[in-house]
Image (spheres, rainbow, N blue to C red):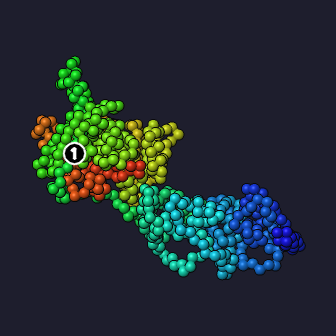
């Protein structure tokens, strides 16, 4: 060890003496210093420092010593270098970009960054002195012929953990592996160092497809797999006048960050004539949404099934009420009315199934439930419901969870008919009402499926909508407001993109803001395709101050759990319901029919109820049943209607 140390000191002193004879000086690196700062201090270029200190290209270490050439910037030693001697310098001024500098001198981005390695980490800054390699001589920069090192991505690994493992930056990792800029697929082979053997030449159009080597086990791994098995085709695109980073990102259905990751020069701004790497089309996942099917063609009549309805009639309360008559109680008790309407619709579904010959036995029990109590546990035990093939009810979420928990061992499906609560995860619990987040998400999914440009006009009072968009729809921009708090129509118009359908998501109860938004959209229609969208019911739109004709011109679109138009199947049910009950069916009656009939037809298939849920979505009258398994257990319904006002003054389904 002493011998090695002595040799190191001797070599260092010899080197220092040689440079001192050439008027070189030394600099001790302080914590936090950069090559650019040191170069500025001694009035030399970072490239001059890298010439004499090649190890500095991998990063500066505090207390290390750098050799600095004299102020003229000329190389002191007559040592062999592979730097182009015909290079020149360039001082960066305001508003310059890498693209503009490269175009000015006719050099490539790769050559400029090779001559100025600090650009990779520090980017382009005003006042920097760049070394411009000559374009007339071959590139003689030293090439690092390091041993080829690769890394196969494992589950749960991130770019950060991999970069840290090999002592490189995330930017370096992405530069060597541009295919992982957008995502990091499991099993993908990353190039860490050196050149991959027998690398194929990339032509004008690149078709990228990654393979997965690890078997996905959890839901997260499955999502990673879906991303990994996505094909993305890239093409070149030349920037045209008046195009912005925002408009480009919307044109190619990417976030601005994703576009910059593919084209780092965009950090410095968008320039006319820039040639960008962009996807030629939107990546399409290998797993599509569930297909809507008619299950009636696959009915199996050989095995009888048992279906149970647990409905909160609370008959004991009615019988013990000595003050109010049954008629008076029905007028006052909205919950009981809802229950009876649901029951009336379910009875018609049961009668229809009987007419069709479905082999199903149906039991109906009074769950005697309130929000905090029920007879569910005793009914399950006393009526042997562990042998049931499906149970509809109870109504309250807590009681439905109790039933699911008690029947989970036998995996009896418990179908919650009306609750919107997310609830506790039970594998056999099926939530049939889409949550508010699912409803909003369906609207955004539909707009994206149409390659739409989405912008948001949201009143500051709508805090829940603002938070939802910021959390779940991060790439959707908000239209700005003026200093006086009014909506900026100019901001709205500046966000519109040509050759795309522009969806304006408007959430406000303010009449003036609604009028301003509608007026801005109507005035833009000659030059742009626009459509008005709301995420929640808006009573202000039903007032006389808002012209219905304008809403039809803008084809007002909104998501809904139920359809607002009468389908042929719904018309048949309505006719039969009126014949039996002498009144039109309420929404609860219609849901009682749709949910009960859908459950029964799933039970008589040649597979289990759960298997039918996993394989097919269905539409019954005014309701959709598109179940998906939740990550924490159980199923949620994502069957949502996307409806719009058509110009013929009718409401139609968009999806």
Asked if residue 373 is positioned above or below residue 36 in the image, the reply reads above
Residue at 31% across / 49% down in the picture?
411
Q: Residues within 10 Å of mark 1 (few under 14, many from 20)?
A: many
On the image, the x and y values in percent for residue 551 come to: 31, 45
Viewport quadrant of the N terminus: bottom right
Asked if residue 33 is positioned above or below residue 575 in the image, the reply reads below
Q: Nearer the viewer, residue 366 or 226?
A: 366
Residue at 73% across / 69% down in the picture?
55
Q: Is residue 313 something one can see in this rendering? A: yes
Residue at 81% across / 67% down in the picture?
67
Q: Secondary structure at mark 1?
A: strand
Quarter of the image holding residue 118? bottom right
Quarter of the image holding residue 425? top left
View extreme (top): residue: 323
On the image, the x and y values in percent for residue 589 come to: 21, 39
Q: Nearer the viewer, residue 626 or 449?
A: 626
Which residue is the site of mark 1?
307
């Amino acid at each position: 060890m002493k011998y090695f140390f002595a040799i190191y000191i001797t070599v260092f002193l010899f080197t220092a003496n040689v440079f001192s004879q050439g008027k070189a000086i030394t600099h001790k690196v302080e914590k936090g210093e950069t090559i650019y700062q040191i170069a500025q201090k001694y009035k030399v270029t970072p490239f001059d420092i890298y010439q004499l200190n090649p190890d500095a290209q991998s990063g500066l270490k505090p207390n290390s010593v750098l050799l600095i050439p004299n102020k003229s910037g000329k190389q002191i030693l007559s040592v062999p270098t592979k730097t182009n001697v015909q290079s020149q310098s360039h001082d960066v001024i305001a508003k310059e970009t890498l693209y503009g500098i490269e175009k000015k001198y006719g050099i490539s981005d790769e050559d400029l960054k090779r001559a100025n390695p600090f650009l990779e980490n520090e980017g382009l800054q005003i006042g920097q002195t760049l070394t411009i390699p000559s374009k007339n001589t071959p590139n003689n920069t030293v090439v690092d012929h390091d041993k080829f090192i690769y890394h196969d991505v494992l589950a749960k690994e991130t770019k950060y953990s991999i970069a840290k493992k090999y002592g490189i930056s995330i930017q370096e990792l992405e530069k060597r592996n541009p295919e992982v800029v957008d995502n990091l697929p499991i099993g993908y082979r990353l190039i860490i160092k050196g050149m991959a053997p027998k690398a194929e030449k990339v032509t004008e159009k690149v078709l990228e497809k990654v393979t997965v080597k690890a078997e996905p086990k959890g839901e997260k791994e499955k999502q990673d797999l879906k991303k990994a098995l996505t094909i993305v085709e890239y093409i070149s695109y030349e920037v045209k006048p008046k195009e912005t980073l925002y408009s480009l990102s919307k044109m190619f259905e990417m976030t601005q960050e994703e576009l910059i990751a593919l084209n780092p020069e965009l950090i410095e701004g968008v320039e006319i004539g820039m040639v960008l790497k962009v996807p030629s089309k939107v990546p399409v996942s290998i797993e599509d949404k569930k297909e809507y099917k008619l299950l009636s063609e696959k009915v199996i009549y050989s095995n009888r099934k048992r279906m149970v309805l647990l409905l909160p009639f609370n008959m004991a309360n009615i019988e013990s009420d000595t003050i109010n008559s049954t008629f008076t109680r029905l007028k006052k008790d909205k919950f009981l009315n809802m229950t009876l309407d649901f029951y009336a619709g379910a009875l018609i579904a049961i009668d229809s199934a009987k007419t069709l010959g479905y082999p199903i036995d149906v039991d109906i029990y009074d769950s005697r439930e309130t929000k905090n109590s029920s007879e569910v546990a005793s009914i399950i035990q006393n009526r042997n419901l562990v042998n049931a093939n499906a149970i509809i009810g109870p109504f309250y979420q807590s009681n439905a969870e109790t039933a699911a928990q008690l029947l989970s061992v036998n995996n009896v499906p418990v179908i919650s008919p009306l609750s919107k609560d997310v609830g506790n995860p039970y594998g056999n619990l099926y939530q049939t009402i889409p949550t508010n987040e699912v409803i909003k998400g369906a609207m955004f999914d539909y707009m994206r499926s149409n390659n739409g440009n989405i912008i948001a006009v949201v009143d500051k009072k709508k805090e829940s909508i603002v938070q939802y968009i910021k959390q779940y729809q991060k790439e959707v921009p908000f239209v700005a407001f003026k200093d006086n708090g009014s909506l900026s129509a100019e901001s709205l118009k500046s966000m519109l993109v040509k050759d795309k359908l522009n969806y304006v998501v408007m959430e406000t109860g303010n009449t003036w803001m609604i009028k301003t938004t509608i007026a801005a959209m109507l005035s833009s229609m000659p030059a742009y395709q626009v459509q008005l969208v709301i995420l929640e019911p808006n009573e202000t739109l039903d007032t006389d101050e808002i012209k219905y004709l304008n809403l039809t011109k803008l084809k007002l679109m909104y998501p809904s759990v139920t359809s607002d138009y009468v389908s042929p199947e719904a018309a048949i049910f309505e006719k039969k319901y009126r014949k039996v009950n002498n009144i039109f069916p309420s929404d609860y009656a219609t849901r009682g029919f749709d949910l009960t009939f859908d459950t029964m037809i799933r039970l008589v298939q040649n597979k289990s109820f759960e298997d039918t849920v996993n394989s097919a979505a269905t539409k019954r009258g005014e309701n959709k049943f598109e179940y998906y398994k939740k990550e924490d257990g159980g199923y949620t319904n994502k069957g949502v209607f996307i409806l719009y006002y058509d110009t013929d003054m009718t409401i139609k389904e968009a999806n």
